[in-house]
């Protein structure tokens, strides 16, 4: 029988995590810089270790089911967040964000993502409580998203969104950045800097990714606390992961298939759950530990296959940067100057 998580643990742990997030943000604002590989590795390791400690506490305070649900949910959100990074890299390159301020942009993007996902979590938990049949819709949506992820055409990344184009037409803007400021003064007149467009592009991207990630994790657990905690842990390490992976992101060609497999698996899990809870109670459900095993296996296989494919192309990874054998550095790695990416 599942033991409920005590209220003091939920409130206390979320309070501590939010304080860590605020401290992280203040550190960036006080000392904007480009983190080295050692710093990025240490931060990623810290957040991963923190997530594992949190899972262990759930095992001790509650039971293995809650701990397993958190681990499966965290790994799912972490893998989907890697997909976020691909888009963040493209946005940084398209708007030529100075490397010194990329950390701050990423942190603002993470905060926007948390707000968006928090709103979707509240809405999703309410809808699920009122109408369990919504899992049919969630499952179908994830199957469609998985198909689009694996076989859909790549978006035209050099095209701005409709909202960005509207802001460009309506707002008084300059083409140059003024540090990390949203507005600057030229000849006594106030103008917006491109930083405004960067934040808008990141924010709209976060909304779209929340549409995928929230139904996915609700396929693993129905606890709003675990859903939000898993999202929080996944997003907390995202900024450092951006700098740690470096040019490797563009070259892990099979990661998208691993993510698509996870989305499809959870889509099927949601539909089976909906069938079990509605008209077909005899339909078996997929358990938490089977879900956790599939998620780990899908990401491990996708990563290994991608690395093997890189080696066959003569590419080698050194501290997050990709080098081509006898051809020098890759032409569009995130370590390059802003604007050199496609």
Image (cartoon, helix red, strand yellow):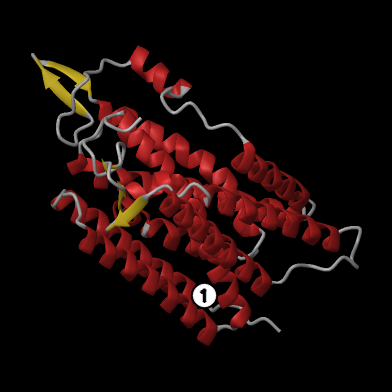
Q: Position of residue 41 (x, y in %)?
A: 28, 64
Pointer 1: residues within 10 angstroms few (<14), some, or many (20+)? few
Q: Quadrant of residue 73?
A: bottom right
Say left or right for 38 vs 316. left
The outermost residue toward the front is 326
Task: Name the residue: 91% across, 61% down.
Answer: 280
Q: Quadrant of residue 161?
A: top left
In which quadrant will I find the C terminus?
top left
Q: Is residue 133 above or below residue 57?
A: above
| Residue 55 appears in the figure | yes
Q: Nearer the viewer, residue 32 or 224?
A: 32
| Residue 85 appears in the figure | no
Q: Nearer the viewer, residue 69 or 96?
A: 96
Say left or right for 292 vs 206. right
Label 1: which secondary element: helix
The outermost residue toward the bottom is 60
Say left or right for 142 vs 110. right
Task: Name the residue: 58% across, 31% down.
Answer: 153
Q: Position of residue 108 (x, y in %)?
A: 32, 45
In which quadrant will I find the N terminus?
bottom right
Q: Position of residue 335 (x, y in %)?
A: 24, 44
Which residue corresponds to mark 1?
A: 7
Say left or right for 187 vs 48. left
The count of marks equals 1
Q: Is residue 297 above or below residue 324?
A: below
Task: Name the residue: 71% across, 55% down.
Answer: 128
Q: Quadrant of residue 145?
A: top right
Q: Position of residue 45 (x, y in %)?
A: 33, 69
């Amino acid at each position: 029988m599942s033991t409920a998580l005590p209220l003091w643990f939920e409130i206390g742990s979320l309070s501590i995590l939010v304080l860590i997030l605020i401290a992280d943000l203040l550190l960036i604002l006080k000392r904007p810089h480009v983190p080295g590989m050692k710093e990025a590795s240490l931060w990623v390791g810290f957040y991963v270790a923190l997530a594992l400690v949190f899972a262990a506490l759930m095992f001790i305070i509650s039971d293995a089911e809650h701990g397993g649900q958190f681990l499966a949910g965290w790994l799912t959100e972490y893998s989907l967040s890697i997909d976020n990074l691909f888009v963040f890299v493209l946005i940084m390159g398209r708007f030529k964000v100075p490397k010194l301020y990329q950390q701050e942009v990423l942190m603002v993007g993470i905060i926007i993502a948390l707000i968006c996902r928090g709103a979707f979590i509240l809405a999703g938990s309410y809808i699920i409580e009122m109408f369990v049949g919504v899992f049919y819709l969630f499952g179908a949506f994830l199957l469609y998203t998985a198909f689009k992820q694996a076989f859909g055409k790549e978006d035209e990344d050099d095209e701005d969104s409709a909202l960005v184009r509207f802001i460009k037409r309506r707002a008084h803007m300059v083409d140059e950045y003024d540090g990390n400021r949203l507005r600057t003064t030229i000849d006594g007149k106030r103008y917006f800097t491109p930083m405004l467009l960067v934040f808008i592009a990141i924010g709209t991207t976060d909304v779209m990714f929340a549409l995928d990630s929230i139904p996915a994790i609700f396929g693993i657990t129905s606890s709003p606390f675990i859903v939000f905690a898993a999202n929080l842990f996944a997003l907390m390490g995202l900024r450092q992961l951006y700098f740690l992976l470096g040019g490797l992101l563009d070259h892990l060609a099979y990661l998208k298939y691993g993510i698509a497999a996870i989305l499809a698996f959870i889509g099927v899990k949601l539909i089976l759950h909906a069938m079990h809870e509605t008209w077909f109670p005899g339909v078996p459900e997929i358990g938490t530990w089977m879900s956790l095993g599939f998620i780990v296996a899908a990401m491990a296989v996708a990563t290994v296959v991608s690395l093997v494919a890189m080696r066959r192309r003569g590419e080698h990874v050194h501290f997050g940067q990709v080098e081509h054998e006898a051809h020098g550095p890759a032409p569009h790695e995130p370590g390059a100057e802003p604007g050199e990416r496609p």
